[in-house]
Amino acid sequence: MITQVRPDGLEDAPQLQLDIDREKANALGVSFDTINATLSTTLGSAYVNDFPNRGRLQRVVVQADAPSRMQPEDLLRLNAVNRDGKPVPFSTFASTRWVSGAMQTVRYNGYPSMRISGSPAPGFSTGAAMAEMEKLAAQLPQGFAYEWTGQSREEKLAGAQSLILYGFAILAVFLCLAALYESWSIPLAVILVVPLGVLGVLLATLLRGYANDVYFRWA
């Protein structure tokens, strides 16, 4: 019933993880805020101040030179200033290792989630494909849930209201025709022709092989 099912996002990739022994760093007088500031300034950048240069005000931004932050061992050569104002090498309280982790974190309503996209197989409607996905999602372990988003959510909400909307539409057309012809019988004869027109649309759609999606709902 469904085809081209795929997760939206980035695959897990190797990442360099820096493990910090907080007890050893605290014993050496190095606070975690200092470690974080050192890493942020070295690998990212830090704004210092502005200075005038030939009539223009330019910013001073500090950052480690590119060759000094390319390898994992470069992190362990960094120095953090302790409470006594002395530099302490990262290698004394930290270590590095390679791990595999997510390159992109997706959340929905505050919960970790994964976006999944797909299409109905040829000969099946989007409603049937969504019902099959709900059947598969019901088999997930306890603690997992699913939610429709985007076009699928709009189709799900519209499906429960289609009969009510059709009823109000027919009533509005009937009242307009009754006011136009000043009769209750003539509008009724005109409205009875509508099912014939709908039948023609259904036959034409089925013969041409068009998809039964949110833009065309007959089932």
Image: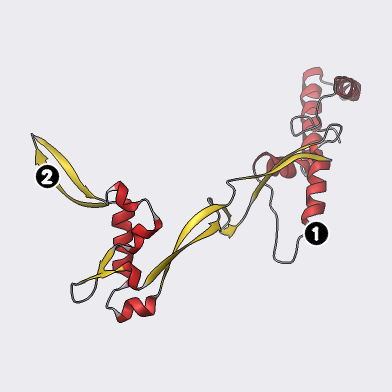
Question: Badge 2: few (under 14), some or many (20 or more) residues near its Cα, within 10 Å?
Answer: few
Closest to the observer, 202 or 122: 122
The residue located at (72%, 44%) in the rendering is 157
Q: Is residue 8 visible?
A: yes
Q: Report the Cα–Cα distance between label 1 and label 2.
A: 63 Å
| Quadrant in which residue 84 is drawn | bottom left
The residue located at (19%, 44%) in the rendering is 59
Instruction: Give the side of residue 39 with respect to residue 178, left or right.
Output: left
What number is the disc on residue 139? 1
Q: Earlier in the sequence, mark 1 or mark 2?
A: 2
Question: Badge 1: few (under 14), some or many (20 or more) residues near its Cα, within 10 Å?
Answer: few
Instruction: Give the side of residue 181 with respect to residue 54, left or right.
Output: right
Q: Badge 2 is on which residue?
A: 51
Closest to the observer, 88 or 184: 88
Q: Is residue 22 above or below residue 35?
A: below
- Image quarter where the N terminus lies is top right
- Looking at the rendered structure, the secondary structure element under dot 1 is loop
Q: Is residue 106 above or below residue 53?
A: below
- Looking at the rendered structure, the secondary structure element under dot 2 is strand
Check disc 2 and give the amino acid type.
Answer: Phe
Check disc 1 and give the amino acid type.
Answer: Gln
